[in-house]
Every structure is written in structure tokens, then in C-alpha cells.
Amino acid sequence: MHKFLHVLILAGLSFTCARAQETHKIWLSGTDFEHPKTWDFKVSGGINSGSWSTIEVPSQWELQGFGEYTYGRWYKELEQDEPSKEEGFYKLKFEVPASAKGKRISIHFGGVMTDTEVKVNGKVVGPKHHGGFYEFDYDITPFVKPGAENLLEVHVWKHSENGSINNAERKADWWLFGGIYRPVWLEINPQTHIAHVAVDPQMNGSLKAVLKLSNPSKNLRVSATITPLAGEAETFEAESRKLSGKPEELLEFNWEGVKTWDPENPNLYVLTLQLQENGKTIHEVTQRIGFRTLEFRKRDGIYVNGTKIKMKGINRHSFWPESGRSTSKRISIMDVNLIKDMNMNAVRFHYPPDDHFLEVADSLGLFVLDELAGWQNPYETETGKKLIREMVERDVNHPSIIIWDQGNEGGWNYELDGEFNKHDPQNRIVIHPWADFDGWDTHHYPTYLTGVHRFGNGENVFFPTEFMHGTYDNGIGAGLKDFWEHYSESPLFAGGFMWVFSDEAVLRTDWTGDEKFDSKGNLAADGVLGPHRQKEGSFFAVKEIWSPVQFKPKAITETFDGSFLVTNDYLFSSLNTVTMNYRVIQADAKALYQPGTKTRVVDSGIIEVPDAEPGETRKLQIPVSPDFFYGDWLEITATDSHGRELYTWTWPIHKADYFAEKLMYKGEGNKAATGIREGNTVTLRAGELSLKLDAQTGYITEIKDGDRLVPFVNGPQPIGMKAEVEKLVLSQEGQHAVCRLDYNGGIDHITWTMYPDGRVHMELIALKNAGRNSGFDGAFYEGDIDQFGISFDFPEEGVEGITLFGRGPYHTWRNRLQGIETGIWEKEYNTTITGESFENLIYPEFKGYYANFLAGNLQAGDNSFKVFSESDKLFLRLFTPDEAKNGFKGSHFQPRFPQGNLSFMYEISGMRAFKPLEQQGPSSQPSNIRIKSGDDGISMKLWFDFRK
């Protein structure tokens, strides 16, 4: 005989602690997957199937080691005949207090995947529930024995018997799980009670409330009070209204002096409603609310509290690698903070999220688009009506929710559009995500120039509910600035939602070996964050691009007067709600030779921030102290009124040649450097250090320092141009040995100079010769230059790290030059593959392109060397990131990298964002070469220090 696990409810303790008129809640499961309770369990198929054991509730059974994993595109890329269809059987013994006798007892399920049949004491308590993303309940009063032991049995079907449920929820681009994954609880109420309340609180303090009453009687009144959730201890008088005795009542209240809710100032109140009979309170409910007014003006915009809004948004799945869609409030708090840290103000889902996520969105401040599931396929009408009611009744009072979505990318049913407002006194709009529908254009993955009479060229308010797709390191930050600035030129632009928040890589309990997390190749590797919320480079790019404080471009020169122009990009807040601090940072002269050497702050202070309304630009002033130009870069940090850092910007105080002079060690050479040519080999020598060049190719063939060979060879190879050595001239200029190579092609000449102390200087002049130009303006032209510079070979094996002076610490792309800042960055070698190496995601990545490269110490044991730039706006190419191994055909991991391993470049490739680069904005496009007779050419000056 199987021994059932037993949940004992301590009635005398838990029931009497609550005031008698409140709803009494008894948890049958844990409150979340991090605080579960154990139930008896059996699964019909897959791993650990066929026999009774135990399972934690709430959970997804696959993550507990049962059943079979299935990804939702089983029918397409995965080429499976059908998804997994196992069934789960749950049992739990429980008690309710004897004092519950005569009261109304209901059981509530926060979410079960996918069909659910519930029995209490052997009897089915109601019709089977269909749909995996919705809260549902049953009145179990006739089935429960108060004061005695009761048996709960829950039969769960992973695959629904309702075909439209499967099409909408389980034929989708996400993981398909099974089980009771959200909490289960009992509610005990008096026979006459408030069953549900839906409110419409306006910015002027008025509030409409739709009350549903169970077993209403005569002589009922409702008393309403509001209390601020935080801040000043404001008091508001209670208001009382007489009821009609009907099961549904519409009540109106009004309070003066309320503070409104918006994402920047998310003021919340607790609404308390007391149901009174003959002057005695018989039931009381509380609800967190926010006073705010929504207006949806077609051909104009979306307004909150009279302000036209622009949503800086992202899509998010309810997901955690070790628990699937069973999450926790801790994760919700972390995720909302991460969204806010990116300076976003909005989030969208493909299904109703956890209630605790919406609570956090209310309290920290986010706009939410709440979606009825339907991934490219809709629910049939009767099923959809039921699920809309469940969704809206649960979520209707959250001030964060401003829009209802019906389905996704074709997953809507036109017969259901009118159902939402049957349950929503706020009359939020209903959109069809990706469609231009009912005056709201939400087209997915638009091109930069979308489109013919739509978006900026159209008449309807537009906000793409998906754009900037983030597969691997694609999209998100790459190209965002172009899209955002272009769309913002239109007064019809209401924002957009990037895809997606985090990689949906799940722990495979059925896998053995080193690989443990599965994103189904490129299908679920879409996030700006890793599965455990590791920050990718685009995180910081978005943070800068969407910062509510925007600096106009500024270069610091010797005439710098401390002024900047800043624009307030908030929707609701004055600029002077922001705190700003500055620091002038000085690097130690030994920083590139002694990794880890600390910088010094030579000046710092608080900046007086001017009053500027949203959209206004004002001058910001910092003092230029006598020590200012002893610094090497300036930092300015902005912090919002809640203490959240908006961003830290940096500006170099000097040019590249200044830093090379300061940071490079100059030794004492006892003898002049020498240069000799023997056949096709030129050797430049200073003391024990020698550098050999091939006279025919111009490439370095050998670098030797005493007995030590430095394998920095086979360059400079031209990138983005052709160049052949035409002649070579070797000369002695004082103590320096000089080798000049003249070229035919894109390079005019390269001059190598060996200094007596062993330093090597390279000066390249390119794009100087216009040749036989044609065209009315007399210019040589060549287009589509996405890479330009020079490259060398250097072995990756043995590399330990780099001390890098430039913009970092993350690698970058041509169209993602935001989110990286000037500094000296100590970077350890790693082989992170963004979107794939989930077992060991190390950020920032090591390999890739780095912008505004000024100096570097490449640490590779005996192969180590240093390089310094005298040229500004130079990119360092530091090896080639490893390609993803598990992507499906047609996925694009990264653009082609040039030949060689270490490159110095003026042009680098752009990164895709789901669309080809030619469909993106200007910064994604290749450059071109234009040369006119008389041009000085483009100079690249580098110093190399191969000395040990």
C-alpha cells in the first residue's frame, strides 16, 4: 500500500491569526519553486515513469527528473512527428480547520500545464481545465470535510485534448513543459463575501470599482479606504456606499490629493473594501492599486496621465534554467531590476506572467503588455472566452498593465477582441502583435525604412512589439541607436519591444556529460542576458542608448571649458531629479607594464543639475580645476531619484599620441640601431632585439629578443584593400634604423623604425593615390568597405589575458559602439560563445573587436608583448570569437572576420539583427573609399614593445 505524504494544516494556529472577516488562505504547495512542498507523484512516460515517488510542488516535472523534454518547434527544425504527451498524477492529504464548516471553500491553481482534472475525496470537483498559462479555481465546499483528513488528487495532461490549446500554446517557439508549476492554495470565505473586484483608479483620485458578490443579502454596504503603500503617512477618509443586493455592483469613489502612478514614480496605494451588514464587517479585501489615466488616441499616441509615452521595452519569458516556467518573487525582483537597469520602462510577454512579476512591475515601475497566449495559432472562441476571463480577472487591477495583447504573429481570433473589456473597467486597448490592426501598428522586425504608408510614413501609431532580435550576439544593441533615432523622428512612434530578455537554456536532467544546458541551438539563444542573467555586451549598449539623460557629442580638447549639453529623455520627471557626479581619472605611467596598477582620482565632485522638463536640452557645467589636464579621462555618473545608476559616460582628456608618450617605457640604448638587407630579408636590430621583414611581401617573418622568439608574424596583411610592395629603402637616421616600403595599391607606404632601446615604430600611409580618377568631382571611389586595416598572425595558444587601454570592457561591432567606455581593462582569456557556452559563460568576452584602442599588454608567457597607438579611433581585433556549434541551418552567429589573429583597423563589420545588414540603419552599412588628388592619405601609427 502506497504511503501518501501528508500536509497538516495547524488550524488553531493559522486560522485564528487572521481576522475573521478576511479571506483565509492555506497553501497546499510551496509559495514558489524555491520554497516547495512535497507531494506524491507518478508520470506515465519518459524517465522515472510508471511508479509512485515524490515531487516538489510547484515545479515542472521534467526539471524534477520525470517525463520527456520537448521544444515547441518539434514540428519544424526538430523534425519530430509529435511532442511528448505524458500524464502526471499527483496526490496530497490535507486538513482544513473545523472552524471552516459552513464557510465557502475553494481551491486555486496558479498554473498547470496543460489539462487538469481535480478530485477531492475521490470525487471530481468540476470540469477539466484546459490551458497552461492561466489561474483557475473550483468551489470545493461540497467535497471537503472540515476538521478531518481530505485527499486531493490532480490528474495533469501535458498535451491537451483541446486542439486549439495545443496549437496556441504547444506549437510554439518555446520550451513545452508539464506539471503544476505555479502555487496551489485554498481560500476560505464567509458565505456572503466579495468574490472579485475590478477597479479603474484615475489620476484625479476618482475610482470606479466593479464588485462581484457571492450570496449577496440585503442591508449591505461597502466602506472603502486607501492607504499609501510607502512614503508619507497620508490619511484619506473612508467612503461608504450602499449596495443594491445584486451579485454585481458598480461603485464610484473619489479622494483628493492622490499621487499618480507612472514607471518613473510608481506610487501605490492599498485599497481596502469592507463588506458590512447592518453595520458589522462580514468580509474585507485589500488590493494594491495605482492612480493613473490611460488614453489611447488613434493617429496621435498613447497617453498616461496626460503625457504621450514612448515604451522602451523588451520581451520576457517566465523562465529559469533549473525550474522552467516555475519561478519565484526573488527572480521577478531581480529581473525587473535588470530591465530597469537597462533604462527600459516596458515589458511584454507571450502569456500571462507570474502574479508576483506584475506586483514587482507595479512597485518598481514598468509598463506591461499582458498577452493571451497564441503563438501564430489562436484559441477557438469558447476556449478563448474562458481564458480571457481568467487572465483579465487575475490581472485587471495592476497599474503596470496598459495594453492587452491577443495572441502573437497571427495567433488571434477576431471573435475574441470584444471579450477583454467585458472584464476590464479601464477599457485598455487590445492589439494583435505584429499586425497593423485597429489603428495600432505593431509590425515585427521592421527594416530601417519600413514602410509604404506605415510607421514614420503612415498614419497609425506604431510600436513594434518585437524588433532587434538577439540571437547569439546579434541585434539588441547592434543597430538599436539608428532604429530608435529614426523612428523617434515621427510623432506617431510609441516605442518598441526587443527580443528577448534572456537565453532560454534549460537544465537537462536527462543528460550526462559536461553539457548540461539546452537552448535548442539558436532557437532559444536570443537574450540580452544569459540564462542565469549574465550580462552580454548589448546590456550596456541599451543602457546608454535608452538612458533618460542624453549627452550631446563632445570632444575634450585643451580649450575645454567644462560644459556639456544634456537632454532630458524622461517622460514624466524633471532633469534635476537626477544626481550627477564627476571624476577625473589618472592612469599610472607603469599601468601597461605592471598589470593591475590602480588609477588615481585627481578631481571629483557633484554637478549641479539644471531644471529641464522632458524633451528639453540644457547646459551642464563641471569645474575645470588646475589638475584637470593631469587626468587621462573624465567620468560622469548619473543616478536617478531612486538611487539607480542610469549610466557612466567617459571622455578621454588627451589624444592617442599623448598616451603613447606617457605609457610606453623608454630605455637607454647604448648603441645605434642597425638595419641590413640580405637577399629578400631585412633585419632591424637594437641590442638583443631583432625584427626581420620579407622584402617582397613587407611581412614580419621573425621577432627575436635574445633567445626568445615572439611569434608576431605574417603582417601587416592588408584588410579591405590590395597592396603589393613596389620598392624598399633602408636608411640610417641618427640612432634609428629605418626601413621604408612603398606599395602599389591601397597602401602608399609603411615605415618601420627601430629605436636604440628596442622599441619599434610603424607608420602606415594608405588611401593617398587617386590614380586615374573619373567623375565630375575627380575622386577615386570604391564602395562596400566593411573592414579596413592591417592584420598579423599570433598564436592564441598560451594567451592568458590582456591589459587593454581603450573602450571596453566588452567587445564591440561597427553598429554597437555604445555601452563601452574609456578605461584600463584587465581582461582574462576566455572562450565564451555568447548564446551557447552556458556551462561557463564568462563576461566580458575576451575575443573580438575593441574600439578606440590606445594601448595593450598581451600576456602570453614568453610570447608577451605590448603595443601603443598614436592614432585615435583605431579598432583592435583580438583573435576571432569561436563559432556556435549547435545552430540550425540559416542561423547567423557573427560576421566574417579578416585573415590573421591580431588586427589594427579603421573599419570593422556590423552585426545582424535578424535582418540582413542592408535592411538596417546607417551605422550598419559598409563604408566607402574616396580619394582625391592631393589628399595626405590615412595614417596609422603604432609602437611595438617586444622587449621582455
Image (cartoon, rainbow, N blue to C red):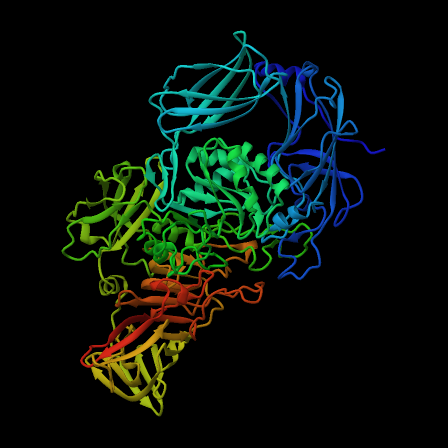
In this view, 127 is above or below 106:
below
Q: Depth check: 218 or 99 in front?
A: 218
Q: Quadrant of residue 44?
A: top right
Residue 65 in percent (x, y) is at 70, 46
Query: Residue 891: percent from the left, percent from the top?
Result: 53, 64
Q: Could you tell me residue 393's position as x and y percent?
A: 55, 32
Tell whether 857 sits left or right of 729. right
What is the tally of numbered marks visible in this picture?
0
Horizontal side, residue 797 vs residue 114: left or right: left
Q: Is residue 156 visible?
A: yes
Image location (x, y in percent) of residue 107 = 66, 28
Nearer to me, 813 or 869: 813
- Residue at 26%, 42% in the rendered image: 581
Query: Nearest the camera: 696 or 621?
Result: 621
Quarter of the image where the C terminus is located = bottom left
Q: Residue at x 42, y 14 (%)?
A: 238
Quadrant where the N terminus lies?
top right
Q: Residue farthest to the right?
A: 1
Up the image or down, 726 lies above or below 507; here it is below
Residue furthest top in the image: 278
Can residue 820 be seen here? The reply is no
Task: Answer with the quarter of the image where residue 646 lies.
Answer: top left
